[in-house]
Amino acid sequence: MAVDLGGTNFRVCSIQLHGNTTFSLTQSKVAIPRELMVAKTSKELFSFLAKQIEIFLKTHHEDHYFSHIKRRQTQGEVKEEEVFNLGFTFSFPVHQVGINKGLLMRWTKGFDIADAVGKDVCALLQAEIDALHLPVRVAALVNDTVGTLMARSYTSPGKTGTLLGAIFGTGTNGAYVEKLDKVTKLTNNKDAGDYDKSTGEMIVNTEWGSFDNSLRTLPNTPYDIELDAKSVNPGIQMFEKRISGMFLGEILRLALVSLLKDPSFPLFRDENSAQNDIHSTTQIHEGSGLWKQWGIDTSLLSICAGDSSPGYRMTRQTLDKDYGISAVSSEDAEAVREIAAAIGKRAARLAAVAIAAIVIETGRLDTSSSGTATTEKKAGVEPPRGNVDSVGKGDVPEEDVIDIGVDGSLVEFYPGFEDHVREALRDVEEIGEAGEKRIRIGIAKDGSGVGAALIALVAGRVA
Ligand code: ADP
């Protein structure tokens, strides 16, 4: 089993692995009531979570649940094999001190429950699960990027293993497989405690969303500066603020508002809509998301990028229906599309920077079955593009494939995101066309749930 406490929702799922890279997944999702995010005691939140697990078991694993209850009542015993190992994806800062032990450092994303800070979140959840006598053991505390990496490793068509799991959703982050001797924080530290050295590898959670917090090397637009200044965490997550779903819509909004204030730019002005076939004037309604911070969702960028309808009808309809901007001319719709496209393209190219850094740093490009330098550019070879899982087949031998799993609404729904990533990867000198061809990118759908369950399964066996 797996549960995921992210920002707004709590997901519970059970996964059956078929052992052949496929799985079946049963999932339920419930919005977390606002009052529980700021409850007086952590018990209120965690007992709600345990209750959701109970409802899930009763609904989807009825036989298992009731036979367990019956045996417990009649025989007073619990059979070990009846207990589900559960992976707990908890997307808040924790100090993880064991596979199923992590102390909450602080709440984020609108949560604020004082007594939970410093406590082991797995123990808090287990206590409430036990209070309901559920056959569930919290076996692993999982970061969502590690879950994505694990899920892709399982579902990937190749046998070479997955290098990187990356998320491009509300936020962005990546976890990758590093050689243990490069993790000097552990290998040079006598007090590092006991850890498994058998594989010679270690998964590193990069937290790349906070890249550029101190370096400040990335070029800024006035909209980046304004977005950051008005955010709840100025100066923090600077890379993420240019890349992920939470922010791209807001960058678009700030750019549009700034154009509206520019008298020399005729965006959404009457003179444009006069050319409209609908013969009405553009109106921005008072309640339009254009006037509110976070008022434009990143899904608008996806709609713009995918709009090939005549006169950009889809973009105009969305601006009308979802954002209260009515009777937009096709010229104005085109202007919105171009700005949205620039924001989306920049996000994807920056995403490629993070991917390129991992590919280069791990030295994966230096090994090739053909023995030739793979960074050398091959003239006349058109690299495959934009086709999930298409790379690595055909002219790239399987052992040369560098496999990457990705998850999140942006990479899943923004049309052409992968194309832009690939174009940027080819532009990186150390990667080039030959290197880019070796990189296989696959969507790890529901990755964090599947990955968390996989980790729980393994952790449960080892325990
Ligand atoms: P999470 O990362 O929280 O698990 P998601 O991967 O669904 O969840 O990402 C949610 C983010 O994706 C939100 O910031 C939302 O604005 C954005 N988003 C939702 N739909 C789309 C879409 N069609 N295209 C691009 N971004 C989207």
Image: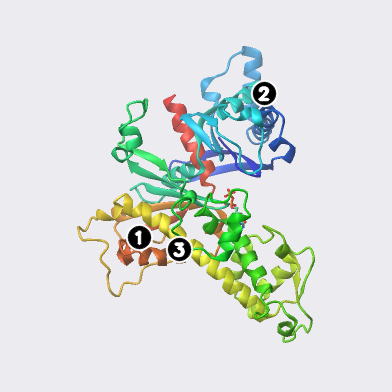
Which-is-in-front pick, marks 1 and 2? Answer: 2
Q: Which amino acid, by three-letter code, is at mark 1? A: Lys
Q: Any atom of ligand 1 within 8 Å of the CB at mark 3?
A: no
Marks counted in the figure total: 3
Q: Callout 2: 10 Å neighbours few (<14), some, many (20+)?
A: some
Observer-nearest of 437 and 168: 168
Q: Is residue 378 left or right of residue 50?
A: left
Q: Earlier in the sequence, mark 3 or mark 1?
A: 3
Residue at 57% over, 65% down: 222
Residue position for label 2: 132
Q: Residue furthest top?
A: 75
Q: Is residue 224 left or right of residue 41?
A: left
Q: Which amino acid, by three-letter code, is at mark 2? A: Leu
Q: Position of residue 188 (x, y in %)?
A: 30, 32
Q: Earlier in the sequence, mark 2 or mark 3?
A: 2
Quarter of the image for residue 319 reads bottom right
Q: Which mark is residue 393?
A: 1
Residue at 58% over, 55% down: 228
Q: Callout 1: 10 Å neighbours few (<14), some, many (20+)?
A: some
Q: Which amino acid, by three-letter code, is at mark 3? A: Arg
Residue at 36% over, 38% down: 202
